[in-house]
Image (spheres, rainbow, N blue to C red):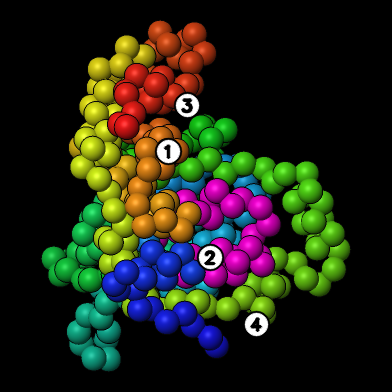
Amino acid sequence: MNRIMEDTSGSDSANAVKDILAKARDEVAKVIIGQQKVVDYSLIAIFTGNHILLEGVPGIAKTLLVRTLAKVLGSGFSRIQFTPDLMPSDITGTNVFNLQEGQFHLVKGPIFTSFLLADEINRAPAKTQSALLQAMQERLVTIDGVTHELPANFTVFATQNPIEYEGTYPLPEAQKDRFLLRVEMDYPGEEDEKQLAIQSLGRETPENILESDAVQSVLTSEGIARVQEALDTITLKEELVSYVVELVRASRNTDCIQVGAGPRATKALLLSSRAFAAIEGRDYVTPDDIRLMAYPVLSHRIILRPEYEIEGMTIGEAVNRLIESVAVPR
């Protein structure tokens, strides 16, 4: 199995990262047809060491996407189906008494993995959702007073159905803020859906392709850490840092926004803009990178005023108004 050499130091860092990301995208594309924006945003979350919130109707390959990313990036994968009766211990694990040995043994839960798919996270009550908080923030899990480490590349991919709200528990603002990005996963385009239909008639379905040798790993977990370090070499000028700060602060003073984004949004926008520049093959960030990443970074961190919601304003329109209100540095 060929793997990309993870030497991402020095002046060649940007090119090395670009090559790695390009190979990862190519491997993912063997299974996931279309959805390039979602794939790119997922890679941004992974390589910045953060988490991503995926919203979309059932049946658009959210689970398959995360499984594919795990294989391509040489990482472990677990899936948790969130339900109203799911308990925190079902996520983290529990200590079980062994009668033969006369002592407790830890039975680890599915959270002990690299890529965790939290499917329909808003179907579990707040107590269960909060079991993810420490893990997402610190990559640690505490069970019966003992703290356990999670893999360095631990990434949560949480999904929500944006249509069904009956019997759901909306994520608290504090937990939504821990997701770097919120991404809306839409239906495939007509040509992509036609290709999927043709594949479903034969043996080369996306699931079969994933299980075959056609999809190769291009990185190890250690390689992911090196790519994360290489992103630090992407140039981000001070005036662009100031621009990001102004954007986030403006969200707290825009007439249509009731609750603006907090300081964590500033860091998220800086990190994601830098990673997006790397995906585009550049070793520097532009204002367009920041403007493009503003919506996935801010959309789940701001709350519209009720009177504007009643008038039909969307979060996207509010973010666009926010972007237009702040002067772009020259």
Q: Amino acid at mark 3?
A: Gly
Q: Secondary structure at mark 2?
A: helix
**Pointer 1 residue:** 288
Q: Nearer the viewer, mark 1 or mark 4?
A: 1
Residue 31 within the segment the image draws in magenta: yes
Residue visible at 39% across and 60% down in the picture:
46
Residue position for label 3: 316
Q: Nearer the viewer, mark 4 or mark 2?
A: 2
At x 68%, y 57%, the residue is 33
Query: Is mark 3 in CB contact (under 8 Å) with mark 1?
Result: no
Quarter of the image with the C terminus in it: top left
Real-space Cα separation, disc 1 to disc 4, in angstroms: 38 Å
The 10 Å Cα crowd at callout 4, few under 14, some 14 to 19, many 20 or more, is few
Span colored in magenta: 20-46
On the image, which quarter does residue 228 sit in? bottom left
Location of residue 97 with respect to 46 vertically, above or below? below
User: Mark 1 or mark 4: which comes first in sequence?
Assistant: 4
Q: Which mark is residue 213?
A: 4
Is residue 120 visible to the viewer in this orientation of the structure?
no
Q: Sequence-wise, which precedes: disc 3 or disc 4?
A: 4
Give the alpha-carbon distance from disc 2 to disc 3, as whole Å.
29 Å
Q: Measuring from the top left, give residue 134's x and y in whole percent.
A: 23, 55
